[in-house]
Amino acid sequence: MGTVARLLDEHVSFRCTSVDRIGVRGYIPGIQYEFGLVKFLLNRGGTIPSPALLNRNHERLVAELEALEERIGVPVVRFKTGESKENLARPFQDEAAATGRPGLVLIGKAQERTSVWRGYVDDTHAGHRPSHPHMAWRRQSSVPDHWYFYFADPEWGPAFVKVCTYAPYPLWCCANGHEWAKCQLAKAGVGFEALDNGLRSVEDPAVAHRICARLGAGHLRGLLARMLAVVPDPLSAHDRAAGFEWSFSLAQFEVSDTAVFDQPRRARAWFEAAIGDHLDLGRPERVSLLVDRKVINRTPDASPPKSSPATRPPSSRSTTSPRKQRPT
């Protein structure tokens, strides 16, 4: 049957390591906490940080999104529960790429749960006067519309960005490193056979390896800039002058190691060898306890007790206090 290492060394016709799916989270640091949100609202000309100011920005943003629908003239769909958004959008992206019409190709909408800011009058605030209410803000769970914008990008191929019109305006972008590599191979004139999510063969494997290895943050920033130049922005120029700006972080990063065997039976042998190598994975003698207490966001930063969970007194366990009902 052979070992895993031997099968990979002797019976693989093509192998390539590449970045696969990438997820980028966008956020505005200045409005992630209550004081920052109050500053954001007062900077917009309000005498008090009223929810009405956020409502105006929400209505403005929705109006610009609806105007974008009419101006671009791309299909707009309401996603159904359980429906694969990616499978629905992919034919539009493939058609745009095949006809040489990159850009926004589809807009989708879906109600999804997220955390949004809700404001209310705090009557318990010291010094409260009816003529000057004190506004308090809390993050609460809600199920608003999220807008999906699907692009056929000349550098990345299929990609999308998702935005929410309610503060703090969470943003999500998704792209695929394999699709980026395919675009670069096509530009270099190197022939290849594509898989649904990867490469099956390349005329010049060395070129494919170099292309996959050079994918960097600058390429991803370029994609974000092109897509966000099309999508209406919750921030105005006045907001940016006051220091409010977008930040981005990698929230999902997958790496794929593609190995194409010369014969199907080699793949079956690889699975059998891999299973044999991992039969003892998870056996009790190979498992060690790293944290022997419940850890939550209020657990003190201290070394775990040396006693075992069975002998530790109940008072040493972390507990969660009941949540107080938030005002609506």
Image: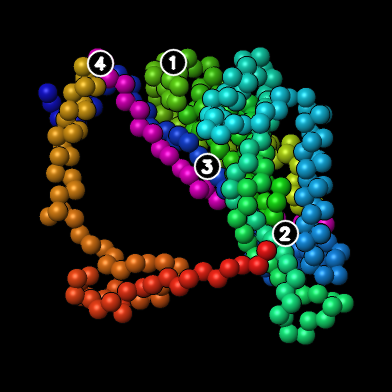
- Which circle's residue, 3 or 2, is located before the other in the chain? 3
- Which circle's residue, 4 or 3, is located before the other in the chain? 3
In the shown orientation, is residue 156 left or right of residue 71? left
Q: Residues within 10 Å of mark 2 (few under 14, many from 20)?
A: some
The quarter of the displayed image where residue 135 is located: bottom right
Label 3 with label 2: CB-CB less than 8 Å? no
Give the secondary structure at mark 3: strand
In the shown orientation, is residue 243 left or right of residue 276? right
Q: Tell me the kind of residue under disc 2.
A: Phe
User: What residue is drawn where x is 67% and y is 28%?
Assistant: 77
Give the magenta part as a residue range: 237-263
Q: Tell me the kind of residue under disc 3.
A: Gly
* Disc 1 to disc 3, C-alpha distance: 26 Å
17 vs 265, nearest the viewer:
265
User: What residue is drawn where x is 58% and y is 28%?
Assistant: 158
Q: Which residue is mark 1?
A: 193
Would you say residue 104 sits in the magenta stretch?
no
Q: Is residue 174 visible?
A: yes
Give the secondary structure at mark 2: loop
Q: Nearer the viewer, mark 1 or mark 4?
A: 4
Q: Which residue is mark 3?
A: 23
Label 4 with label 3: CB-CB less than 8 Å? no
User: What residue is drawn where x is 71% and y is 28%?
Assistant: 76
Give the secondary structure at mark 1: strand
Q: Residues within 10 Å of mark 4 (few under 14, many from 20)?
A: few
Label 1 with label 4: CB-CB less than 8 Å? no
In the shown orientation, is residue 143 left or right of residue 57? left
* Disc 4 to disc 3, C-alpha distance: 33 Å
- Which circle's residue, 1 or 2, is located before the other in the chain? 1
Q: Tell me the kind of residue under disc 1.
A: Glu
Q: Residues within 10 Å of mark 1 (few under 14, many from 20)?
A: few
